[in-house]
Amino acid sequence: MPVPGLPILEGLYPSTMDLYPFEAKEFNRIHPFYENLRQNRFTTTKCKKCGNTPFPPRVVCPKCNSDDLEWVDLPTQGKVLRFTEEVAGVPLGFEAPLIHALVDLGEGRKFISRVINCKEGQLKEGDTVKLAVFEVPPMIIEKRGGVMEESPRVFFAFEPVK
Amino acid sequence: MADVAIVGAGQTVFSRSCGVSIRELAFDAFQEALEGLDITTSDIDASIICSAPEYDKQRSPAGLISEYLELTPKPSFYVETVCSSSSTGLRVAWSLVKSGLHKVVAVIGFQKMSELSSRDAAERMGRGADIIWESPFGLTMPAGYAMYARAHMDKYGTTEEHLAKVRVKNSHYGATNPKANYRKELSLEDILKSDMITTPLKKFDCCANADGASCVIVARGDVAKGISEKPIWVMGLGAATDTMTMAGRKQLTGLQCAQEAARQAYKMAGVKPQDIDVAEVHDCFTVSEILAYEDLGFAKPGEGAGLIEDKETYADGKIPVNVDGGLLSKGHPIGATGGSQIRTIVRQLRGQATEAQVKGAEIGLVHNIGGIGQYGNVTILRR
């Protein structure tokens, strides 16, 4: 469909407007995170040398500089520490209410996420939420000869445990 | 001793829609900054252009503005720390002058946000967060600060009424600021009854996007005395960067970047919080001003709400804060905001404030934050 005022965008992929990360292996070295996510696993990297397990995942250990890392599973359930329900002025690509939460995954691990499948006024601090994985629009990769290839993508949020 | 001074400071009116292009905006601020100075454009040795690039159609605006202001062939370049870009610009200008490389440097901040729809602007603002780990959740500035507000309320008993009282004060002073976008005085009830944006922040807890430009002219001490009747001396500069992700923050009850920047600035200036006569703080949201009271040491941690409750941050209080209306009244044209805060303090220290003048103000402070607490900048000035 032509974009009003910008008919030149028809059929093109404006990558700088893409809301989701460039997940394909051609674009980053943490793509296993997304492959694991597809299997409903929430993972990060653990340093085999010093045991440091930061999130987000790394390619080099920020503590000891080793690149001998392994993928390990993180809990997929956590408790809501803080949250806010955004009911107006949500950014392009999102619908109100947009619920943001600081989720405690245990072991001192806190994580910012969106909470989905949750009605306005339903969430309370202390509630348990679990990982929810969903498909998002594919990434378009321009290959040799201008061939456009679709790379499927998933992303995640948390949802209340019923 | 301070041997770098601010000799001129100007800004445009901040408005929802300025009706001019960015080069024209920049020119207006530049013109006001040069007023009363015994120099011409050719005396400016370098220019630093400050804005948040995601809002601009124009790429590399430094060259464009440099040409329009006829600053070529002097060097011009761009600096960015989102909402604190022009405070970072001042830091760089100070270094250029202090190093002996240049004598007079112009710091020009601008933003024209009216070219975007508000949802598009929110989305671009959101990409000032980590685009792999946090932006994809739709996390934006209001939601980030709302979580700081929740944390502060929970830990210290700060209430929505305390937040609203910050806006009551700032709207009171903003009403008399001819450069402010929002010039209506608001009652506590107006604010508490305004539409919810993101719990617990309501419409009047939030500053508005705006168009505007600011300009600060920085000069070497000996040059400053020759070209300006009232140079304002740069006594202290502090800057710190916190994690890009909000998840990486140690706590949500204060901004660590501001605490660290304040520590550096007080140390460099050799002054204490109680020595500050007037301050401009980054009130992008009402809660941000309360966090600033504590991060700057005007109040102990957890006691910021008491300061507004007791009206101690009014012009006749213990520590007047944002007596030009703050970002809440003026509006927040990202790249121009720091320069506008500096302009207010310069005018206060010169005894030239058009809004509430703090009597006999000698030492002033500017607190300017970039992003959701990513970049902290604190500047201490003296007459």
Image (tube, coloured by chain):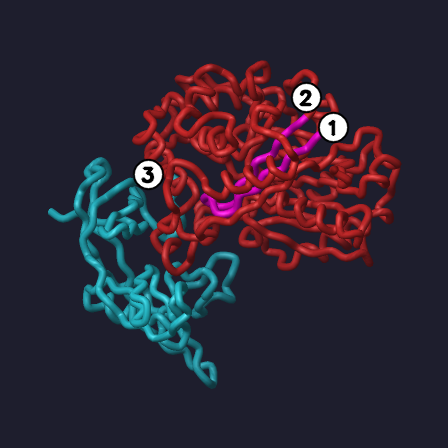
Estimate how packed mark 2 is, as few (under 14), some (14 to 19) or many (20 or more) residues with alpha carbons within 10 Å: some
Q: Is residue A26 left or right of residue B378?
A: left
N-terminal label among 1 and 2: 2
Residue under numbered circle 2: B361
* Amino acid type of the residue tagged 1 in the rendering: Arg
Label 2: state its secondary structure: loop
Subunit of mark 2?
Answer: B
- When asked about the image quadrant of residue B364, the answer is top right
* Quadrant of the frame with the N terminus of chain B: top right
Between B174 and A13, the one nearer to me in the picture: B174
Chain identity for the colour red used in the image? B
Q: Is residue B313 above or below residue B148?
A: above
Residue at left offset 46%, top offset 30%: B294
Which range is magenta? Answer: B363-383
* Amino acid type of the residue tagged 3 in the rendering: Val
Residue under numbered circle 3: A87
* Quadrant of the frame with the C terminus of chain B: top right
Q: Which mark is residue B383?
A: 1
